[in-house]
Each structure stands twice: as C-alpha cells, then as structure tokens.
C-alpha cells in the first residue's frame, strides 16, 4: 500500500517562499507519477504540479508557472514543491498525490489513487 506523508506547510507573507515535501513509501516499482493538488474552502480541487517517472515530463497549472518548481530525491522517494513569489490566492490545503503505472504527468489528475493528509499553506497580503 502506497503511503504519502506531507510536510512543510505554514504561513507566509505575500512574496515569500515555502517548500512542501512528500515522502512516499510502498511503491511496487518506479513507474509512478507524483504531484500536488490544492483545494481552498468552497472551491474545487485543482492540480498544481505533477511529474512523470524519471522526470520525463512535468505539468504546472498556469497560475503557478514560473513561480513553483518540482524536484525529487529518488533515494528518499521524496517529492518537493518549491513555491516562490507566493500570492494570497495560493492559500489553500495542499495535497500530495501519486499514481502507479503512470507515465505522463498530465495523467495524474485522472489516475491519482493515493493521497496525503494535506498541509495548509496560508499567504497573507
């Protein structure tokens, strides 16, 4: 059973930075997509960023392009979301997600089966 454990949320002022971490365990092999989603109160969940196995491709929502980046520590099976130039509209609960047998980052929105517990990000103006 795949488990995802997130950390790194918090409160920051607009223009600041935060880094979220998602440590994964239980994968059967390396053909996994991982990524981040967010959901604010009263809003639909949206995909923020995702990465395919081996980093062959990545997905970023238009709203975060140029501000958020993804990186991985394969030895630790950990995915990082570096969030820079944060805006109040980035305030949300952020969830790590993963899908096995996934080969395209754009497919994570459909294939995501495993979810973390969520970590809150609050950006004040």
Image (cartoon, rainbow, N blue to C red):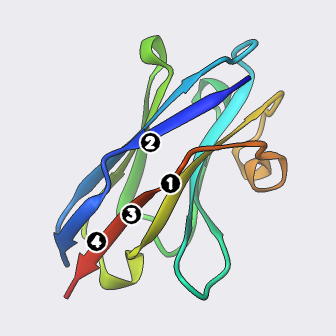
77 and 122: which one is in front?
122
Marks 3 and 1 in Cβ contact (< 8 Å)? yes
Q: Which residue is mark 1?
A: 118
Q: CA distance from mark 3 to mark 1?
A: 7 Å
Q: Nearer the viewer, mark 4 or mark 1?
A: 1
Q: Secondary structure at mark 3?
A: strand
Q: Which residue is mark 2?
A: 6
44 and 3: which one is in front?
3
Tell me which label, 3 or 4, sits earlier in the chain. Answer: 4
Q: Is residue 119 left or right of residue 36?
A: left
The mark found on residue 86 in the picture is 4
Residue drawn at 74 percent across, 48 percent down: 108
Residue 68 spot, x, y in % from top left: 39, 58
Q: Nearer the viewer, mark 2 or mark 4?
A: 2
Task: Establish if 98 lies above or below 20.
Answer: above
Q: Which residue is mark 3?
A: 120
11 and 30: which one is in front?
11
Residue 69 spot, x, y in % from top left: 40, 50
- Does any portion of residue 51 appear in the rendered image? no
Q: Nearer the viewer, mark 3 or mark 4?
A: 3
- Does any portion of residue 56 appear in the rendered image? yes
Tell me which label, 2 or 4, sits earlier in the chain. Answer: 2
């Amino acid at each position: 059973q795949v488990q995802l454990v997130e950390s790194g949320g918090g409160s920051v002022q607009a223009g600041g930075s935060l880094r979220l971490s998602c440590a994964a365990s239980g994968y059967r092999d390396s053909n996994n997509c991982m990524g981040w989603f967010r959901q604010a109160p009263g809003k639909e969940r949206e995909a923020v960023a995702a990465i395919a196995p081996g980093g062959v491709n990545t997905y970023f929502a238009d709203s975060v392009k140029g501000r958020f980046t993804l990186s991985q520590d394969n030895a630790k099976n950990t995915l990082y979301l570096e969030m820079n130039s944060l805006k109040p509209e980035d305030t949300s609960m952020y969830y790590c997600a993963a899908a096995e047998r996934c080969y395209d980052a754009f497919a994570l929105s459909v294939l995501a089966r495993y979810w973390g517990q969520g970590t809150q990000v609050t950006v004040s103006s």
